[in-house]
């Protein structure tokens, strides 16, 4: 059973999807700690209801990004986590974070990477850009984070239809319901079952039988 740490900044709907899958027995792991950059994040309440430890680390309390990142590393290492999930964590960390946790950090992005990703593409901005471009399909991507924004080997993707009368808010809700809340817990479950193998820039999903690699 793996220990999972989560970094959050807001409502934590993706965190809730992971919690639900843990509670249903779909993830062979436990939520060890949830760390928020925002003391008012509702995600903290979700964590407390699940019985997970919580911690608030505000970047305002640190002189620079590196010091803040090192504080996060210390808190997560103290809990001896096996996997870190970025559930709407709105800060860009120092590259030392991914160096401290190689192949142990998962992020979800509300688009099909490499489209509509990178600096400035977060929250509703992603869906606004999708609608402005007029694409017919969008979706969500779960990937291993490697220190660059929305970068790293892709684990799972799921496409979502873009409709002609969509607003950014309507599209955001559909992407969450049809893609994000499904593939993020699934990716965590695959990791917990030791079924993910990184091969260069690609991720191979191993068959369930055999289990280990």
Image: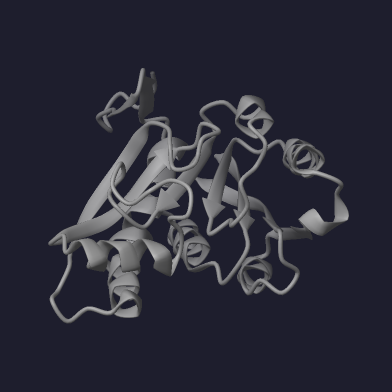
Q: Which of 35 and 114 is in front in this view?
A: 114
* Quadrant assignment for the N terminus: top right
156 versus 48 height, above or below: above
Q: Which of 49 and 165 is in front in this view?
A: 165
Identify the image quadrant of residue 35: bottom right
Residue at left offset 63%, top offset 63%: 9
Q: Which of 128 and 180 is in front in this view?
A: 128
Q: Can residue 200 be seen in this view?
A: yes
Residue 28 horizontal side relative to residue 81, left or right = left
Horizontal and vertical percent position of residue 110: 36, 57
Horizontal and vertical percent position of residue 125: 41, 65
Q: Can residue 27 be seen in this view?
A: no
Question: Going by the picture, which residue comes out furthest to the front?
Answer: 132
* Quadrant assignment for the C terminus: top left
The scheme the figure's colours follow is one colour
167 versus 67 height, above or below: below
82 versus 178 height, above or below: above
Horizontal and vertical percent position of residue 161: 15, 65
Residue 154 horizontal side relative to residue 120, left or right = left
Residue 41 horizontal side relative to residue 196, left or right = right
Residue at left offset 28%, top offset 79%: 167
């Amino acid at each position: 059973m793996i220990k999972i740490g989560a970094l959050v900044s807001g409502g934590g709907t993706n965190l809730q999807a992971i919690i639900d899958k843990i509670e249903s027995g779909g993830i062979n792991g436990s939520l060890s700690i949830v760390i928020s950059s925002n003391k008012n994040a509702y995600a903290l309440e979700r964590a407390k209801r699940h019985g997970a430890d919580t911690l608030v680390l505000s970047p305002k309390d640190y002189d620079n990004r590196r010091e803040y990142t090192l504080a996060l590393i210390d808190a997560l290492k103290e809990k001896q986590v096996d996997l870190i999930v970025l559930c709407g964590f709105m800060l860009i960390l120092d590259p030392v974070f991914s160096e401290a946790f190689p192949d142990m950090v998962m992020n979800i992005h509300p688009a099909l990477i490499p489209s509509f990703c990178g600096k400035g593409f977060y929250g509703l901005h992603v869906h606004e850009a999708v609608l402005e471009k007029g694409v017919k399909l969008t979706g969500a991507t779960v990937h291993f984070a490697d220190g660059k924004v929305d970068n790293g080997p892709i684990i799972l993707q799921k496409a979502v239809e873009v409709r002609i009368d969509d607003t950014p808010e309507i599209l955001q809700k559909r992407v969450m319901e049809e893609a994000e809340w499904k593939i993020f817990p699934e990716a965590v479950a695959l990791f917990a079952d030791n079924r993910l193998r990184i091969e260069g820039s690609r991720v191979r999903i191993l068959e369930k039988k055999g289990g280990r690699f």
